[in-house]
Structure formats: C-alpha cells, structure tokens
Image: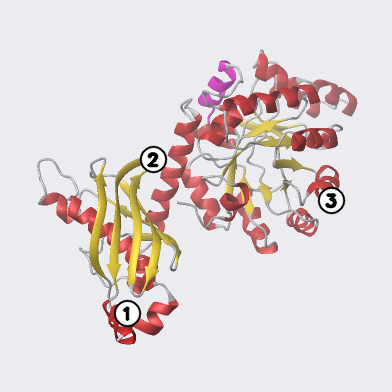
Amino acid sequence: MFHGNQIVNLLGIDYPIIQGGMAWSSNSTLACAVSDAGGLGIIGCGGRDIDWVSDEIDKSRLISSRNIGLNVALNDLNALEIVKLAISKGIKVFTMGGANTYLPLLKLYGDEVVIIPLVGSVMEAKLAERSGARAIICEGQESGGSIGRLSLFTLLPQVVDAVKIPVIAAGGVGDGRGMRAAFELGAQGVQMGTRFLASKECSVSEEYKNRILKARDTDSIVIYNLINFPARVIKNKYAIDYLSRERNGASIQELQELSKGRLRLAVESDVDSGALMAGEVSGMIREVKSVREIVESVVSEFLSQSIKLASKKELFDLNLRDYLRHEPPFLLIDKILILKPGIESVTSLRLHRDKWFFNYHYPDYPVMPGSLLIEAMSQALTMIITSMDEFKLKWDGILLLSNINSVFFRKEALPGLNLVFTAKVDSFKRGIVKGSISCKSEDDLICSSEMTLVIPSAVKQFSNVMN
C-alpha cells in the first residue's frame, strides 16, 4: 500500500503514521499499540527520569515485537544519557526538538540510528538537513503542547521545497482527510498526538479524554507566551486564570512557577487545575477508539480521499491508458497507487453501487462476480509488464492470460468497498510472466491468486531464436 513511501522504508513500518511523543501521556502501552497497528509508536521521555525510561523500554519488549521510538524533550539535561541507554537497548528511532538537543546527538549517533528533529521554520529545516538528519517533522501551531509560530499548511510546502529529505507533517492532522492534505503539500508522513490521546490505550485520565471529546472548534488556546514556551491547551479554569495573570502584569518568575508540573497534574488527577495540552484537532474528535481503529480509519480514509481527488483525466488518460488497453466498463482499476515496472503494482477499485455488474449479478444481493475479480487481478499484474521500457521497445502488443493457480475467495466484494490489489512478479522469462496477486479491503482479504501471463510477440521472438 505504501511500499514506495520514504518514511515507511526509512522506519520499517507499514503506514507513514508517527505517534507524537507526548510527555506524561505516552508510555510503552500506547507506543506498542501504535506500532502493532502499523505506525511508529513513541515513548515520551519529557519530565521522566532515566530509570522510568529504562523500565518502559523493557516493558515494550514484553508487549510487542515491533519497533518503537523515543521522544527526547526539548533541551532535556538527560538527553545524552537517555539516548545512550536507549541505543544500548535496541531503540533505533528518536524524535526531538531544539537544535541544542539534536545537533550534538546527530553528530554522535546520526549514522547509527534515525534522529528526526522537529522544526518550525524553513531555516530550522535546512539546518537539520545540513546536520545530517534523514527526515524531519514539520510542526505547525495547530498542534497540542509546545507549538511553532506558523500554520502547518503554509509552512509545510515551504519546508518541502527547501529540503531533499522526507518531511513528516505535524499539527492539526487527525483523520485521513488531513493526512491526504498533508501529502498533497509534499509530506511523506504525518505525526498525530491529540488523536492518540483520545484512545483506549492512552494512560491519561478519563476526564482528560472527555474534555477532548467535548471540545468545540474554538476551545483550544495558547498559554506560556511570555515565558517563551508557547503551548496549546484546551480552555479550562487553570488556562483562563493563567492568561488573566499575564494580562495583569504578573512577573516572569511568577508565571514560570505557575507553569511547573501542570501537565502532569492534568494527566494524572486534576483537569481543572492542570494544563490540558491538546491540539486544535480536538474539535473534530467525538469518540474514544482503540489505536488500531484509529490507524485503520485514517489509512482507509486517506486512500478514499486519494481516489476522490483524482480526476477522470488522471485516472484514464494519464495513467491507466498508458499501461492497459481495456476500455470502461471492462477497465476494472480506478487508480494506480504504486507502480514499479517489472516488480510490483498497487492499484485500487472503488465499488460504487452503480457499477454495471451489480445490476445483473444477483441484483437482489449485489456482489462483484468472481470472474471479474480474477480479471481485475490480471489487469493489476499486466501493467507491471506493460510499464517496462523493454516491453515498449521490443514487444508491445498485448498480454494474454495463460494459467490460473491457487485462486481463493475469502470474502464477498460488496458495494461500498474500496478494493486494493497488490500484484508482484515472481518470474519473467522468454515472454512468460508468473505473478501473485492479492485483493484486500482495508485489512480484510477478499481474494488472491497466482497467474501466468504470456506476451505472444515475445514468445514468438524467443521461439524463432531457439529454432
């Protein structure tokens, strides 16, 4: 699905979704749940002592076999010790903000592990790239907790244009639509924090989660500006009182004292007297879900938005008709998601209720015919070959289905599903192509098959050589 994605390949994950490293809120339980769901879970080390970090890493090894990462807090005095310890325990990915924190660590460990700096400007992004970062997180002011100065969707395209390394978008992303928007602006991944706060696996208090669910679009505000640590929180008694003291001329020392320990207080016990750090996306969240439900929903909606955004010209004139000679309604692929000539393809087909075959194949119980599923799978395999330069230069023509093996139909292909076909070439010799194809809807396997295709012109050419 995301085989060609740079963040997926760099981090060895299934989906380019990174969990925010939320201090006092992100432990081994949450991080492992995110990684098990296909993203990258992060243990938040902000405010924690090194023994706690060590214990949480050890717990994560008992919970999951998937990799997790650590977030090292801005200017944390224990940053070097935490990173050393984590590396010794097999942690390979770290997210962190502040050049004073990540620059020396990049120099020491940048070749050994993946250190991903958080940046809030083009200048910071360029500095991180020059210093050896292999990816960066571009964070906008919509995010919860500490924030940048600019809106994500104005900053993101400028950062993408300024660097060559992959960029992860953070701030205001809570569903597949936000992820799609970030990708349209050049991001290769997204980081989500607030959406995972409102998850079953997150350890914050239930009342903290309820405040997120109840939040309206205008209920997030920014505090701590005067002490140079701007942070976005959900409006509560504490936040209103703090802003009142700022306006009434409280000293910097008084404001600093008033800020200490407030996040931990909100997380563990008192949501009225603590700082309820959460992003603007709180206004979109209406239900506490499991981490797996959140990740699967985001990915499914992302793929759906990808298809909706593609015009008919993109679908047929620019992509599919370059590789397939079928015409609607027998063209059974809507969009090419990934295409590696000679290797693999990932394509999709949205089963709208008005698809022609639903009206004729059991009209009282519409289901896509198995024969058409086989045809769609063969088209997915075909384009892997027709996209090869060698095919265009030497053979051209068409491919024909020669043999079908190991066909399995697991679930029905019903109206409303988005089918994703993953095809891979197993061997290609003398004009004979053998490949394997699977068809899924989200994580459900619909059908699979092994097929043999032949290129008549190539087979004839090789036969003449042999004779």
Distance from Cα at disc 3 to Cα at disc 1: 53 Å
Dot 1 corresponds to which residue? 458
Q: Please state if 392 lies on the left or on the right of 88 as rendered.
A: left
Which secondary structure lies at badge 1? helix
- Between residue 417 and residue 308, name the one nearer to us: 417
Q: What stretch is highlighted in magenta?
A: 206-219
Q: Nearer the viewer, mark 2 or mark 1?
A: 1
Distance from Cα at disc 2 to Cα at disc 1: 37 Å
Query: Few, some or many C-alpha atoms within 10 Å of disc 1 (few <14, some 14-19, many ≥20)?
Result: many
Q: Hey, what amino acid is under mark 1?
A: Ala
Question: Measuring 86% from the left and 44% from the top, which residue is drawn there?
Answer: 100
Question: Measuring 56% from the left and 44% from the top, which residue is drawn there?
Answer: 13
For the stretch drawn in magenta, the main secondary structure is helix
Q: Earlier in the sequence, mark 3 or mark 2?
A: 3
Q: Which mark is residue 107?
A: 3
Q: Nearer the viewer, mark 3 or mark 1?
A: 1
Q: Position of residue 260 (x, y in %)?
A: 80, 22
Query: Few, some or many C-alpha atoms within 10 Å of disc 2 (few <14, some 14-19, many ≥20)?
Result: few
Image: 79 above or below 459: above
Q: Residue 443 carries which label?
A: 2
Indicate whether residue 413 is drawn in magenta: no
Q: Are marks 3 and 1 in contact (CB under 8 Å)?
A: no
Image: 124 above or below 75: below
Which secondary structure lies at badge 3? helix
- Between residue 231 and residue 201, name the one nearer to us: 201
